[in-house]
Amino acid sequence: MKAMRHISAPSNGLISETSSPAAVDARKHNALKEDRQDALLLGWDQNGTAVNWNPVQSVNPHVMILGESGFGKTYSTSCLIAELTRSHITSIIFDYGQGFTADSAHPTLLALAKPQQFEAARLGIHLNPFEILPSDLHGPLSVAQRIADTLGRVFPGIGIQQNAAIRDSIISLYKEVGIHSQVISSWQKPVPRFGRLRDALIENADDPGRSDRNVFRTAASHISSLFVFDVFRGTGISLPWTDLLRQANPVVIQLRGLEQNLQRAITELLLWNLMGLLESIGPGPLRTIIVIDEAHRMPMGAGSAVEKLLREGRKFGAGVILASQQPEDFTPVAFSNTATKLVFQISDHSSTVAKQLFRKLRTPIAFPVLCKILTTLERGNAFAISNNEGAAIRVATFEERFPRF
């Protein structure tokens, strides 16, 4: 946050920027003009100083938004998406709870950003997770392990044996169509249909000559919803990532109506596909911010797509906005790799969030004061932290950001 420079600590423990009253008043009324090219307005601290988020210039563009229901998480996320649109940065939003549909999104967001809606849950997606990406150094082996690990993270009950059964079944499917890990030229051949994975698992489960056929049977059972809903199909909607990243309009991928584990699996497989494209393009400036408004729906553990985005996304031009209600929805990796945080009122009985913030916070705020701030914030107010400096702010409204709307 560029406003957080030359700071002093008033008696209440909150930070402010030293400046004349006239300068403070000018910034308050002209906040969008301050570093307008790159900085996006978050809100104002108690002195009226503009507090900004600068994803373009930051070495860590990731944002965590945390707070109880009804205090402003989705509204603030919508404001940031609108700000990103004005800065010509594409937002890719995974919507699970209808917060960003044409019927439920904030009218100003719809009018200003004109998000594109992709009804992935209802219409399916024209994408094959078996596609071998340029970043897959071991070709079909890389894909097989990635899919097996992804399904293992999102479907309860998949253990080591089921993981191996899924991986080996995928490898055998590649071999059926003449794609072999040791023959790089074969990686250009058409890949098998994704639906063939279920067939391969069932065929092995029905093979009386296999002593491990029950492992294949349970693996097929655990992931059956992927194929019952047939989300990845040739007749589904296309997600032309390259074209979508050239525009500023947000992209909303609607997954409402699907079972939660299925939503998680689809999101992660789509994220791997998107990251494969970004890696093939190579390192570059910030191109997109991926928004997950209900982060508790996504696996964030070791090896997950979200973890890779948090650790390596900036290098390839991708940032992440993660929002959720409970601190336990976020892993230590998420806490440590989101340089910018907006924390709305939370219960935080065990001071979990306060401790996480206090460890990194350079701003001179006493720990008891920080705990009180986090648990008594009024609606529309948040504790903003970036680059280890923090302040309690009033989040700017749509009307303050975009008065003509």
Image (spheres, rainbow, N blue to C red):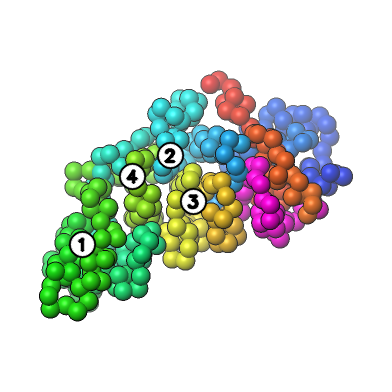
The CA span between labels 4 and 2 is 10 Å
| Residue ID for mark 3 | 296
- In this rendering, position of residue 394 left or right of residue 230: right
Disc 4 or 2, which lies upstream in sequence? 2
Mark 4 Cα shell of 10 Å, populated few (<14), some (14-19), many (≥20): some
Picture residue at 33% right of the left edge, 44% below the top: 258
Disc 2 designates what residue?
A: 97
Helix, strand, or loop for circle 1?
helix
Please state the extent of the stretch shown in magenta in the rendering: 339-366
| Residue at mark 1 | 197
Using the rendered image of the protein, determine whether residue 155 is visible from the camera's viewpoint: yes
Q: Amino acid at mark 1?
A: Leu
Distance of label 3 from label 2 (alpha carbons): 12 Å
Label 3 CA crowd tier, 10 Å (few <14, some 14–19, many 20+): some
Residue matched to label 4? 258
The secondary structure type at the circle numbered 2 is loop
For the residue marked with disc 3, what is the amino acid?
His
Marking on residue 127? none
| CA neighbours of label 2 inside 10 A, class few (<14), some (14 to 19), many (20+) | some
Amino acid type of the residue tagged 2 in the rendering: Gly
Kindly identify the amino acid type of the residue bearing the numbered disc 4.
Answer: Leu
Q: Earlier in the sequence, mark 1 or mark 4?
A: 1
Q: Closest to the observer: 210 or 392?
A: 210
Magenta highlight on residue 364: yes
Q: CA distance from mark 1 to mark 2?
A: 29 Å
